[in-house]
Amino acid sequence: MRCPFCGHEDTQVKDSRPNEDGAAIRRRRFCAGCGQRFTTIERVQLRELMIAKSDGRRVPFEREKLARSIRIAMRKRPVDEERIERIVNGLVRQLEASGETEIPSAQLGELVMDTLREVDTVAYVRFASVYRDFREARDFETILGSLTNVALREAGTDAVRELGAASREFGEAGPDRPKGR
Ligand SMILES: [Zn+2]
């Protein structure tokens, strides 16, 4: 693998270990060219998943973009990184198990919302308020306002703002907003 720092072609694997659930292998690599170290993650990919967007475009599904949006939605919630990884793995497995190679973006969005709803109400509301295009913004404010913890409320507002930005990026490879909602 080429060094991401200097472009040197030859990097050496120093250490390989499976992650917690054995679904991935992390490799520590060393570049003989510049001395930098970096990590690569190897995962099973059963098939190439594509996301079919509502405007007719098809883009490759990107796990990292999905994970990033979920991480933002979960910010300051009592859900640790390991659990988030398991949630993302579970979502990817569901997509792969669907047997489809092409997933409508609206379906992915609904799947994420269904999952978040079960895990954490606040994270669900954050994600849903962005995904549903703030049409339900008043509901969102009501739910957010019912949170008595001011810091949590502020964290929620920040998270939603950031999710809005992430969802534009998400829109390139994740669920976009359903039209007409
Ligand atoms: Zn290098």
Image (tube, helix red, strand yellow):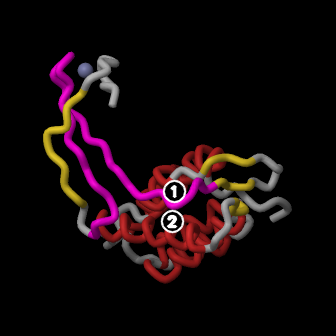
Pick the quarter of the image with the N terminus.
top left
Q: In this rendering, would 144 be left or right of 55? A: left
Could you say which quadrant of the image residue 109 lies in? Answer: bottom right
Answer with mark 1 or mark 2, whichever residue precedes in sequence. 1
**Residue 94 image offset from top left, x and y in percent:** 54, 73
Q: Is residue 114 above or below residue 66?
A: below
Q: Secondary structure at mark 1?
A: helix
Could you say which quadrant of the image residue 25 lies in? Answer: bottom left
- The three-letter amino acid code for the residue at tag 1 is Leu
**Residue 175 image offset from top left, x and y in percent:** 65, 58
Decide which of 18, 36 is in the foreground and name it. Answer: 18
**Residue 42 image offset from top left, x and y in percent:** 35, 50
Q: CA distance from mark 1 to mark 2?
A: 9 Å
Label annotation for residue 66: 1
Provide the residue span drawn in magenta. 21-49
Q: Is residue 88 above or below residue 60?
A: below
Residue pictured at 43% horizontal, 67% vertical: 89
Q: Is mark 2 within 8 Å of ligand 1?
A: no
Q: In this rendering, would 12 be left or right of 105? A: left
Q: Are marks 1 and 2 in contact (CB under 8 Å)?
A: yes
- The three-letter amino acid code for the residue at tag 2 is Val
- For disc 2, the marked residue is 92
- Answer whether residue 31 is magenta in the image: yes
- Answer whether residue 66 is magenta in the image: no
Mark 2 crowd level (few <14, some 14–19, many ≥20, 10 Å Cα): some
Q: Secondary structure at mark 2?
A: helix
| Quarter of the displayed picture in which ligand 1 can be seen | top left
Residue pictured at 28% horizontal, 70% vertical: 21
Residue pictured at 65% horizontal, 62% vertical: 131
Q: Is residue 76 above or below residue 28?
A: below
